[in-house]
Amino acid sequence: MENNTIETQPVQAKVMPKLKFSEKLGQGIGTMSVNLIFNVVSTYLLFFYTNVFGLRPADTATMFLLVRIIDAVASPVYGTWVDKRTTRFGKYRGYLLYLSIPYAVLSVLCFYSVDGSYMIKLIYAYTTYVALSLLNTFLSPLGAMPAAMTRDNDEIAQLNAYSTFCSNIGGMAISFGVPFLVTAISGAYTGQASQKGWFLTMGIFAILGLVGLLFAFTHIHEHYHMSDEATEDVSFKDIFVQMKVNKPFSILLAYLVLAFIFMTIVNSAGSYYVTYNMGRPDLLKYFNLLGTIPSFILVPLFPWFKRHLGRKGLMLGFSSVLIVGLLMMYFGNVHNVGFVMTGKLFASVGMIVATGYMWAFETEIVNYGEWKTGKRENAIISSVCSFAVALGLALGGVVPGYFLNSIGFDANLKMQTAGTLHGILTMQSLIPIIFIVVGMILFLFYPITDKSMNQMSKEIDERKQQTTK
């Protein structure tokens, strides 16, 4: 069963049932709904904690690190547990129903400002954030869903495009909607006066996320699973087997860590950059909006980019565009709004494509793992990817908090020192570039192509046919 190389000659793969539009839309809206809630958290929670709730940056950074360590430990254990069980609604689909309401409720509680001493606030923040992060981890079967829906190479790209497109609709709502709604409700975006606005705004997004998860539950269908015999044979050690024999898996894991480090840093730093460096907090909603608007043009072109640039060309090319945009913001005059916004647009184009397309690799590595080991361990692979995401979010969340503390940031000051402003600029641009470059180097070694995907699917089908004879 072991193969050391992937055959790359053209192969006619077995014809697979085509997914319905409703299934693709369900996957897209489900992904958007999870992200609609958690992207508010990852983008704005640091700013909320330091500028509204009243926590110190260093304490917030430590909390982010500890919470993500908990997530990282829980993810692979949970993935193994999921792959060994089947809910009454399917192997993965049932979790969308079971967890949707708790996930929505806890997201709102994270943005509620309790009264009391500093320690009471810290304990409350830890409790609600740990619980929400664990529920986000427990929703990781949604990431395993595409591999349970299809093995068709084109449909994998389409599912990824639907998920990314819908997620960016949600991202646009978050980028523009959060600053707009908070200010409209409270009359302020920062400070204690904005507490009601943050709480009610998160309530609106939580309701939208809940409705979206229930829509996904009713429209997604699962078509490919392990046999009962293979399911019984699943164990925690399979994680290490997959990582040993599945080279694309290892590459993707490393890239996910790096991607979520630089995404979290860029997203977290944006609020500080616009508020203090540019001195234009009124432009934050437009600055953030540029992070999502290009997706409506770019996401439908994902399959075209992949066909004409290849996987490596796509990732390397658009990562380079991202770097150009960040450098424009670093070297440009922060008071030249047009130039800064152009830099943000370039950075957004690069980030949308590079970090949007990376999720298509997850389904590919599930196929690769089944080809290597005979087990289609969707949830195990998805959960380990969630582990990598949690680790990236942990490190990405720690960097801004501790960095703000080290450069003397004080949320009580309307004007920061020159050293603090330069530190925010560095955090916004130069620090993320380091991680982006390392990620580009990783993808030079990614081995899967369209031809090898078809070859693997053909061999997997032939093995199953032989087994059933």
Image (spheres, rainbow, N blue to C red):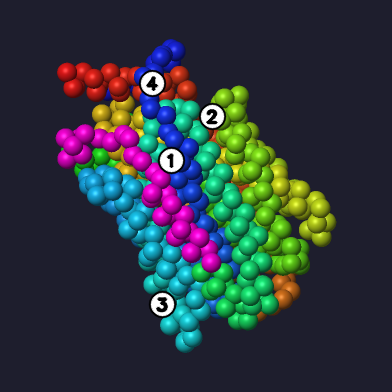
Q: At 71% from the left edge and 72% from the top edge, which residue is drawn? A: 416
Indicate the position of residue 300 as horizontal and vertical percent values: 60, 36
Q: Which residue is mark 2?
A: 311
Answer with left or right where residue 398 lies relative to residue 385.
right
Going by the numbered disc 4, the residue's amino acid type is Val
Q: Earlier in the sequence, mark 1 or mark 3?
A: 1
Q: CA distance from mark 1 to mark 2?
A: 25 Å
Front-most of 55 and 224? 224
In this view, 32 is above or below 53: above
Q: CA distance from mark 1 to mark 3?
A: 41 Å
Q: Residues within 10 Å of mark 1 (few under 14, many from 20)?
A: some
Q: Tell me, yes or no, whether the two marked residues, 2 and 4, touch with CB atoms within 8 Å.
A: no
Q: Earlier in the sequence, mark 2 or mark 4?
A: 4
Residue 16 lies in magenta, yes or no? no
Q: Which residue is mark 3?
A: 123
Magenta residue span: 204-232
In this view, 241 is above or below 294: above
Residue 229 lies in magenta, yes or no? yes
Going by the numbered disc 2, the residue's amino acid type is Arg
Going by the numbered disc 1, the residue's amino acid type is Glu
Q: Which residue is mark 1?
A: 23
